[in-house]
Amino acid sequence: MNTYEEKLSLLTEMISFAKIDGEIHERELAFLSIVAAQLKIEKPVFESLFEHPAEKVVIKSEHQRILQFYRLALLMHADGVLHDNEQVAIREMGINMGLSPFAMKGVLNEMQRSPTGLIDPDMLLALFRAQQN
């Protein structure tokens, strides 16, 4: 993530995604707070994004788009409930980011098989690389 505006855009997208099922679960909020802290976004700025979304910035780097997709997938699993509308939305968001639908499906399947919901970063990248060949 290069610019402050990109970081705010990323968080805005994640907040919007967290609201898809009608509410933001406590664990989703905790996850969002961790991401904001990692991105060095001040707490008042982070909190203001819930009422005043940042302008969307297109992520140019494929690596950053893959990372954003994975963050969204982690957020989707944070509350322990996989809603149909979340699964549809994450696929649409990934396609809008220009990511391979087959790679996205592979990532989501691996996350469901994992007891922790996490997958190894090398596997994440390998799933996307396999679709480029």
Image (tube, rainbow, N blue to C red):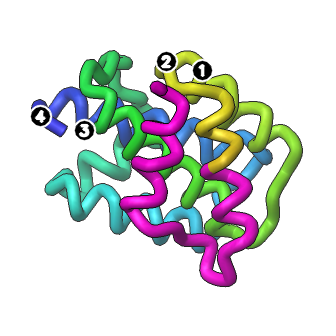
Q: Name the residue carrying label 4.
A: 2
Of circles 4 and 3, which is in front? Answer: 4
Which kind of residue does numbered mark 3 sit on?
Lys
Q: Name the residue carrying label 3.
A: 7
Q: CA distance from mark 1 to mark 4?
A: 22 Å
Secondary structure, mark 2, is: loop
Name the N-terminal-most of marks 2 and 3. 3
Do residues under tags 2 and 1 come within 8 Å of each other at their CB atoms?
yes
Q: CA distance from mark 2 to mark 3?
A: 19 Å
Q: CA distance from mark 2 to mark 4?
A: 19 Å
Do residues under tags 1 and 3 come within 8 Å of each other at their CB atoms?
no
Which kind of residue does numbered mark 1 sit on?
Ile
Name the N-terminal-most of marks 2 and 4. 4
61 displayed left or right of 113: left
Which kind of residue does numbered mark 4 sit on?
Asn
Residue 116 vertical position relative to residue 17 in the rendered view, above or below: below
Q: Residues within 10 Å of mark 3 (few under 14, many from 20)?
A: many
